[in-house]
Amino acid sequence: MSKINFSKEAVKKVVLDIDNKVKILNINKFSNQVDIEIEVSNFTHKAKSDLEKKLLPALNEFFLKDISFSIKFTAVKKDDLNNVNQLSNIKNVIAISSAKGGVGKSTVTANIAITFKNMGFNVGVLDADIYGPSMHIMFDLVGRKPLAVKVNGKSKMKPLESYGVKVLSIGFFTGIDQAVIWRGPMATKALNQLIFDAEWGELDFLIIDLPPGTGDIHLSIMQKISVNGSVVLSTPQIVAMADARKGITMFKQENINIPVLGVIENMSYFSPPDLDDKKYYIFGKDGVKNLSEDFNIPFLGEIPIIQSLRESSDIGRPGVLQEGSELTKIFNEITKKIIINLTERNKNLPPTEILKIKTMAGCSS
Ligand code: ADP
C-alpha cells in the first residue's frame, strides 16, 4: 500500500478502523509531529497500552514516514456515562459476594462494616440476600422495623442503626421462621424499594451483601447502582472455589466490568484454643491465595475458624466489637487493604458504568 499525506480525516479513519468505540477528541499537527487525544471508557494501563500497540503501527503503516504520532488517553467523564445512579450522597459502593452459600459472607460483611465504622467512616449495609437475609440477626435488629420519613414530600424508609452502622434488610419485613418465597420480579421489586426508597443520608461506604450465586439479583443491582468494587469471599475447599471463580468471572465480564478489589479466604484453618501454635487446614491450604494468583487479583487476608466468631454472630454482636482481639486485628488488616485498593481503583478508573444488559451469557443462578 502506498503511503499518504497527513489529513485529520485519514487519521480518524485509521483509528476508528482499529477501534470504533473510542471517541477522538483532538488531532493536532505541529510540523511533522501529530498528537491524537482519544477518550476511552476502559482507562486501565493495560487497555491503554494494548490500544496504543495497535494504533501506532497502523498509523505508521498508513502515513508517510516523516510523520510521527503520539497518543494521549482521556477517561470518559462521569456525566458521559449515562449514570443513572440515584445514590448521589453515597461515596463508594462495595459489593461482597461469595458465589457459594454458607461460607461466611454475611458474617464477614457485618464485621467489615463495623471495622469501617470503627475507623471513623459512615457506613451502611444493604442486605441484598433477598431469599436468605441475615443482617437483621447479625446486627441484633430482629423484630425491629424501619420508620418512614418524609424527604422532599416523599415517604422514605430510614435504615435502622446498630453499632453505628445503618442497616436495611428484607429480614425486617419477614417473620424469623418465614421462608421468603417470591418470583424473580417480586424479589427485584422488593430490592428496588430497599435501594431507592431508603434515606441513607451521607455515607462513605455502602456495603451490599449479595446473595450467593451469580444470577438475577446481581444483574438487577448492577443495572441500578454504580458499584465501585467487589470483594469475593470463599473457603479454601475445591467446591467453594469453583463457585468463587464463577463470581470473579462475572464481575470481570466485559459488559459488567466491576473491579474485584480482592479475595478473602474464610475458615482458612483451625487452631485449638489449648494448642494455638497448631494449625489444622480442615478445608485445604492456600486455595484462595492460589485463586487470587490465577486471576491476578489482590489477596486481602485469611480468617481462621474461630468459635467466638460464630457465637458472636448468632447473638447479633459481631466479633470485631471486642476491641484488641486477634479477630479485630485480622479485620483491620483486611479492611485497610480494601480501602487501599479502592482508592487506587478510584484514582485510575472512571466510575463504574451502570450495567446495560444485552445478554445473560455467563450468568446463572
Ligand atoms: P453465608 O452468608 O455465606 O451464607 P454466614 O455468614 O451465615 O454464611 O455463615 C455461616 C455460618 O458459619 C454461621 O453460623 C457463621 O457464624 C459461621 N462462620 C462464618 N465464618 C466463620 C469463621 N471464620 N469461624 C467460625 N464460624 C464462622
Image (tube, rainbow, N blue to C red):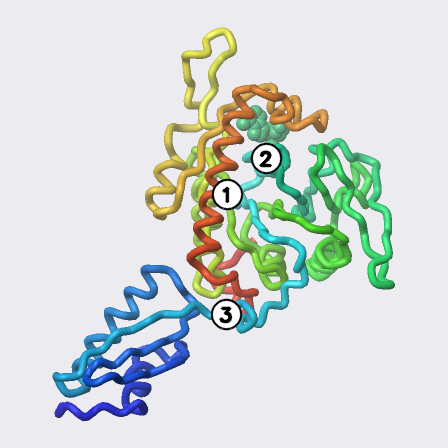
Residue closer to the observer: 209 or 129: 209
Q: Residues within 10 Å of mark 3 (few under 14, many from 20)?
A: few
| Amino acid found under the numbered disc labelled 1 | Ile
| The disc label shown at residue 339, or none | 1
What residue is drawn where x is 76% and y is 53%? 199
What residue is drawn where x is 53% and y is 65%? 353
Q: Determine if residue 183 is in view.
A: no
Residue closer to the observer: 362 or 279: 279
Answer left or right for 212 relative to 245: right
Image spot of residue 214 (x, y percent)? 54, 53
| The disc label shown at residue 77, or none | 3
Which quadrant is the N terminus positioned in?
bottom left
User: Which residue is tagged 2?
Assistant: 119
- Would you identify the image quadrant in which residue 143 lies? top right
Q: CA distance from mark 2 to mark 3?
A: 31 Å
Q: CA distance from mark 2 to mark 1?
A: 11 Å
Dot 2 and dot 1 residues touching (CB under 8 Å): yes
Q: Residues within 10 Å of mark 2 (few under 14, many from 20)?
A: few
| Amino acid found under the numbered disc labelled 3 | Lys
